[in-house]
Amino acid sequence: MQRPCVSRRTVIAGAAALPLTAPAIGRPQPGLQQVNLLLDWKPMPTYAGFFLAREWGLFAQRGLQVALLEGHGAVIATQMVAHSSEYWIGVSSGVASAIGRSRGLPIKSLSVLYRNTPSVIFARAERGIVVPTDLYGRRIGLVPGSVTVEEFRALVAVQNLDPARIATVSVDPTAAPLFDGQVDALIDYEENLPSALRADGRQISVLRLADAGVQLYSFNIIAREAAWTSPDKRSIATRVAEAVQEAYSRLQYTPAAAIAAFAPLYPDFSRAYLSQAMAVIVRQLGRQPLGQQTREGWQATIDQLGRLGLLSRPVTPDEVAGDLPPV
């Protein structure tokens, strides 16, 4: 298995061949409410809390049987939660949620699991890319259509970098361009490609966008607005979020137990990779309470997206998120 050629979209190339829907749904259990939850990508370690909530019976304890279905990116997942007949609850990113809301998508954020973007610019250690100005004169690989492209633009804007001094190259979502000399650096969630490379013994450096001033809410749970205003579905959504947050909390305090429970589900993930990825996830989840979203956090995200011209119209935190604390 050549880990350096894998990404968050392809690191589970083998596991992706396994049917996610069948094991996710399983046999209906009497007395449990059935819920289809749409992930925004394939079953990566990022989503471990969702799978662990199922494996540890946290959904069932709350009267739910939750099917976890793989998606095709945060933007598409947000659109499907807003309008499809199959899903009314799912996973997105803060960027996609705010942009979608500005475009009229009727969605609400229920829980923000990553209050800072996990995206990093990573390079072979000998390239010496450790601070934003190290990007000058370098070629940065960007995956067309990925929200990381907008996050890269945010980094350039926040750091007042001269974009004319940084070359960008469209690449496929693998690590291959980094090792065949096509680019000097790539961008991805730290728990994905960078962790896979480290697990494979590669020496890489990372420049965390959050440490460089990019203030964007990331990994979050969303629901269709009409469902959020329905008492029955609001109750379901709240219980889903509580179960997932409990699972991630357990992951934070007992990552070894989380790895032991998650690894058998997708055996193509090496234990070395899962250890690297889970360590990043523990840090990324941050301090308790998990899932908390604030008006200030959403306003910072909205302001940054607005400065980049990515919002179709101005939006407020209360439009994007449900049940924010009062002013």
Image (cartoon, rainbow, N blue to C red):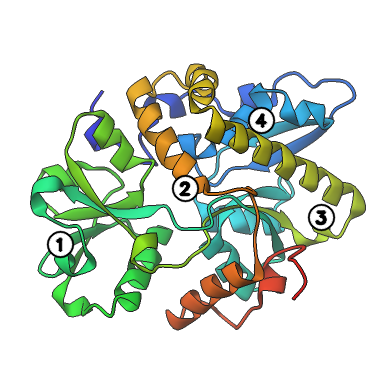
CA distance separating discs 1 and 4: 41 Å
- Across and down, in percent, residue 29 comes to 82, 20
| 104 relative to 196 in the view: left or right | right
Q: Amino acid at mark 2?
A: Gln
For disc 4, the marked residue is 53
Q: Earlier in the sequence, mark 4 or mark 2?
A: 4
Task: Using the image, tell me which numbered label, if any, was put on residue 284.
Answer: 2
For disc 1, the marked residue is 139
- Across and down, in percent, residue 261 comes to 55, 20
Question: Which part of the image, by quadrant, shows the C terminus?
Answer: bottom right
Q: Confirm or deny contact between disc 3 and disc 2 (CB under 8 A).
A: no
Task: Using the image, tell me which numbered label, if any, was put on residue 73.
Answer: none
Q: Nearer the viewer, mark 4 or mark 2?
A: 2
The answer to whether residue 76 is above or below residue 30 is: below
Q: Nearer the viewer, mark 3 or mark 2?
A: 2
SS at circle 1: strand
- Across and down, in percent, residue 145 comes to 40, 60
Q: Amino acid at mark 3?
A: Ala
Task: Using the image, tell me which numbered label, if any, was put on residue 227.
Answer: 3
SS at circle 2: helix
For the residue pair 26 and 31, the one nearer the viewer reads as 31
Question: Which part of the image, by quadrant, shows the N terminus?
Answer: top left
SS at circle 4: helix
Q: Confirm or deny contact between disc 4 and disc 2 (CB under 8 A).
A: no
Q: Amino acid at mark 1?
A: Arg
Instruction: Name which residue lies at 49% across and 23% down.
Output: 18
CA distance separating discs 3 and 1: 45 Å
The answer to whether residue 255 is above or below residue 37 is: above
CA distance separating discs 3 and 4: 22 Å
Q: Earlier in the sequence, mark 3 or mark 2?
A: 3
Q: Confirm or deny contact between disc 3 and disc 4 (CB under 8 A).
A: no
Q: Earlier in the sequence, mark 1 or mark 2?
A: 1
